[in-house]
Amino acid sequence: MARARPIDPDSRRAQLVSAARQVFATKGYHAAGVADIIDGAGVARGTFYNYFESKRAIFQAVLNELMEGVVDAVAPIDVTRPVAPQVRDNLHGVVSMLLEMGDGARILFTDAAGIDAEGMETLGEFYGAATGRIERALRTGQDLGLVRECDVGLMASCLLGLLKEPVYQGLLRRRVFDADGLVDTIFSLVGGGLMRPPDAAA
Amino acid sequence: MARARPIDPDSRRAQLVSAARQVFATKGYHAAGVADIIDGAGVARGTFYNYFESKRAIFQAVLNELMEGVVDAVAPIDVTRPVAPQVRDNLHGVVSMLLEMGDGARILFTDAAGIDAEGMETLGEFYGAATGRIERALRTGQDLGLVRECDVGLMASCLLGLLKEPVYQGLLRRRVFDADGLVDTIFSLVGGGLMRPPDAAA
Amino acid sequence: MARARPIDPDSRRAQLVSAARQVFATKGYHAAGVADIIDGAGVARGTFYNYFESKRAIFQAVLNELMEGVVDAVAPIDVTRPVAPQVRDNLHGVVSMLLEMGDGARILFTDAAGIDAEGMETLGEFYGAATGRIERALRTGQDLGLVRECDVGLMASCLLGLLKEPVYQGLLRRRVFDADGLVDTIFSLVGGGLMRPPDAAA
Amino acid sequence: MARARPIDPDSRRAQLVSAARQVFATKGYHAAGVADIIDGAGVARGTFYNYFESKRAIFQAVLNELMEGVVDAVAPIDVTRPVAPQVRDNLHGVVSMLLEMGDGARILFTDAAGIDAEGMETLGEFYGAATGRIERALRTGQDLGLVRECDVGLMASCLLGLLKEPVYQGLLRRRVFDADGLVDTIFSLVGGGLMRPPDAAA
DNA sequence: GATGAATGAGATTTCATTCAT
DNA sequence: GATGAATGAAATCTCATTCAT
């Protein structure tokens, strides 16, 4: 009711995106209304449309922010130093970031792909880029003699799945787990597989 | 236009579910309208509501059918026979099933979780059950001395991710691949990890 | 509130167009809302959109109906019979039609051109066709030796103006006049001036 | 962006009206937004409302300016000198003025009447005044024995239509023509038909 | 059982106007 | 006097659902 005090447009925009993330994370894209977002931001309806063309547009902004957050959690690997710890850090960084997002992650996992063709494409490109990075890393590893022969394309998306699925199920089934445990599990699997060495003790 | 000839209610129901699967797969839950479904089934609007309470209800029916299809693709493991080939068959069965579904799989991957809390729960239970089965298998494997120590809960969802992610990306990015390649990749990873043995040749 | 009894779609459509004509005539396109139209027709909002895609669309339907009405008021001239009375009848028919339309005529005179480019074009084509008919009539008249030399294009639109302006001012200034008076006036002007005196000298 | 330098209020007002005329002429009243006007004038939104109470108000200002322009193009007739050339000059002046206005004329022809009752009234008065002038001229002509008997009221608006319609169609159908041709056409029609032949029989 | 016209709550979006700085 | 962020009433349009035939 009281008129929101005018503030720097960039701040207002950021505030709206933040409110929107909250709302989308909680209710999902379709159940969320612009009304929820402006309530969250304490702003009038018209103000919203001064900053975003549509509900779809602010969703895209939220999505971009989330994707950026994940990307920023990954540091380039320096091959002149031991590789494993760096990979471990990156893995840990991404998982922590996703866990921190909490319900926000459902936007990346579920909502974005279910809205329209453009959403699918955005997400497809994002995961494509991620897979691409893993793929290149695998090839480098092969060149360095660390990684064995395999179909790098498929292997890359398998590895991505290794990371995503536990986080996704954490969301769906509201189970909590800690990032270190997951990183350890992934490392042990990638490091030596699942099978017990026929007779390790022998 | 022409009045649809009265048919056995079960057939009509099946016909509607089938049309609905098609429509949901193609357009997604929200973009799909009841109009699309009845057009697909060649039935009047009122008829639809004689068989289903709501759009949400028929979606649930479609979802159930799909989940059932996946479950049916998995045979129980008979521990008195060699295990690996049986696991391989199951894996192959599930992947083939998902690939056959084509766009229908997006319902399982994306749409179902994005509709409402109930959808999330349904899917959570489904994946929970799948994870549970894998978990039990792992434990059995450990008992038999085939599988080494690990956090079976996390490992189970990791393994599920190994399978889902490539299929999901196939959908998102419209890449095709064949089921055997994926099964091989998964098996090689699970079998011995990703690293090249220090000096396998020695 | 009470549910409108289902009727033949064509009738419903006609009823909506009729209500819309009334509303547009009274309030003008922009001041009129879909709410006014459905109130007029005693129908729910959704019903309106079962029949017309948009407010703009039903306006077009109204416009077409009005234009058709005017066109139908004009009979082709039969040159084997005396021409003047036929022209007089046509003139009288058009003027009467416009006067009967009452405020509806403002749609043709004012609203249609002020809505969008398409409205302007529709109206442009309509008046273009009218002018074209007059033009052809003039040329025929010239061939028959009844009409003297002139710039038929300009003359045609002048003649159209002769008819339109009094009707238009009748609308704007809420003056009433009768069709016969106008036809007489036009005839006296055109008759004395446009026709070549058969044999002025004789 | 840059703060507009303070200028003489009358100039600012004129600047706004000028920008508004441009905008209204191009887009029409309803499609034009206050945003377009202030963009055109290079002025902030708030500034606009320092000078005009509303969009409607500045439209009225534009309208008044245009009507004045037309009125000023007409010189009083001096009956002690030959009348025809004076009439011709006035006709030519008005037509030229309207043609110069270009799209601006659509404001007079179309937009003004389509806005609200007040717009209709304003325009009604304007055309009423014009018709009135023509009417008085006709009566004077009758007194001088130059013009024959007729219903001067109707005849006056007919004559006005003679002039307006070609210009209007020029707008609607984007045809160009020159003022002289139209004046000639009108004169030939009126001259041959309206004037009593001085002594046809003698 | 089948039909399809009718419904109406509710969502998104627009834009002229206000007012604190 | 100039500014421009904020406002919010009001309009259009959607579509799952109802119900009389």
Image: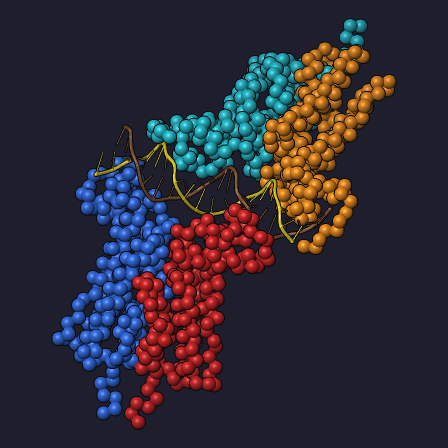
Chain colours: A cyan, B orange, C red, D blue, E brown, F yellow
Counting from the top left corner in percent of width and height, residue A135 is at 62, 26
User: In the displayed structure, would residue B121 be above or below residue B15?
Assistant: above
User: In the displayed structure, would residue A197 be above or below residue D118?
Assistant: above
Quarter of the image for residue D177 reads bottom left
In the picture, measured across the screen, residue C168 lies left or right of residue B155, that is left
Counting from the top left corner in percent of width and height, residue C76 is at 48, 77
Write the residue at 54% across / 57% down.
C13
Q: State the residue in front, B128 or D27.
A: B128
Write the residue at 47% across / 76% down.
C75
Quarter of the image for residue C158 reads bottom left
User: In the displayed structure, would residue D131 be above or below residue B186?
Assistant: below
Counting from the top left corner in percent of width and height, residue C30 is at 40, 52
Residue B18 visible to the viewer: no
Write the residue at 68% across / 39% down.
B52
In the picture, measured across the screen, residue D189 lies left or right of residue B94, that is left
Spot the residue most to the left.
Answer: D80
Counting from the top left corner in percent of width and height, residue A117 is at 58, 38
Residue B119 visible to the viewer: yes
Q: State the residue in front, D175 or D116.
A: D116
